[in-house]
Image (cartoon, rainbow, N blue to C red):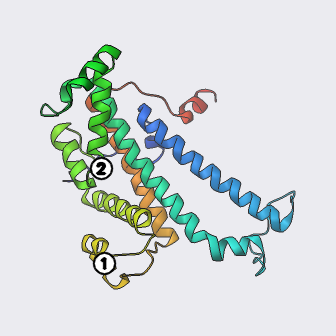
Amino acid sequence: MAASDDQEISGLALLRQPATEALVRFLEDLRATIGFQAYLWRLIVKVDHGDPTGPPNPSALPTSNSAVAEMDNIHSALLDEMLFCRAVNSFLTYLADLMTLIYEKYPQKLPSDKKTTYRFCIEHHIAGDLVSALAEETVMELTHKRLDELAEYFSEKLDLVLFTKDEYAVNAALCVDIRNIITHNRSVINRFFIKRNPRYADELGKRVMVAKNERRDMLGTLGYCARQIDIRAIQQFGFPTVSPQTDKADDNE
């Protein structure tokens, strides 16, 4: 369930907020993805233009047999799907990492009714990592739940609201559903997907298509939510933080 909050930090102030280790890993993953895209497109342009001293003319249309045209017309849909899935996976992994941080700092929050084997407890007690092992096992179980169930668990069991607005929750759920249909059904929309997302009712049997601008907005909102969740988690649990690079740059000016 979403909770309303009109006081969220935004703009440059948001980018300058200290971050947990979990968010740092999430942001590093996003940077790596952007870097990969830039590298890939440099290679593709180089095939057509050699090694130009300056950027290619953006108004010059690629010829029909160029590498750029082949990428745009044949391979871009597959690449977009891969990058979309990667971004959604990164967000889900962030939630798992954040949950692990909570359990490791506050082991009393681990589910009291959790069942495990005697051998598991003995082995990890001897190794001195019983709490972290129980946290890891619990996180793995919880992250296989539906996103709305996971959000409810965070809210009720960990006192941490994931989505402060219904529109954020709806966006995140759609991102996960699209990621699932890409991963598990070769991007083909089925009845289960339509049941959860009725607006796609006329697309049964077709490949799920998300316009470039819509995809950018969806993933941008997901990243915004991760940053807001991190701020609330730091306030709630007192996690140690890492200052963003922008702060270091500002200090040197």
Q: Secondary structure at mark 1?
A: helix
Decide if residue 210 is on the left or right side of residue 153: right
Does residue 19 show up?
A: no
Numbered marks: total = 2
Q: Position of residue 19 (x, y in %)?
A: 43, 34
Q: Quadrant of the C terminus?
A: top right
Inspect the image, locate mark 2, and give the three-letter code of the amino acid beneath it.
His
Does residue 60 show up?
A: yes
C-beta proximity under 8 Å, tags 2 and 1: no
Taking depth in this image into account, of 102 and 18 the one nearest to the observer is 102
Q: Position of residue 224 (x, y in %)?
A: 40, 50
Q: Residues within 10 Å of mark 2 (few under 14, many from 20)?
A: few
Is 58 above or below relative to 94? below
According to the image, label 1 marks what residue?
Answer: 199
Question: Which badge, 2 or 1, is on the more N-terminal residue?
Answer: 2
According to the image, label 2 marks what residue?
Answer: 144
Q: Secondary structure at mark 2?
A: loop
Is 170 above or below relative to 251? below
What is the spatial separation of the Cα atoms under label 2 and label 1, in whole angstroms? 25 Å
Decide if residue 109 is on the left or right side of residue 169: left
Could you tell me which residue is drawn at 38 percent across and 62 percent down? 180
Identify the image quadrant of residue 99.
top left
Could you tell me which residue is drawn at 30 percent across and 20 percent down? 123
Task: Farthest residue to the front: give it.
Answer: 119
Q: Position of residue 23 (x, y in %)?
A: 43, 38
Could you tell me which residue is drawn at 86 percent across and 58 percent down? 51
Inspect the image, locate mark 1, and give the three-letter code of the amino acid beneath it.
Arg
Taking depth in this image into account, of 148 and 144 the one nearest to the observer is 144
Q: Could you say which disc has been placed on residue 130 in the image? A: none
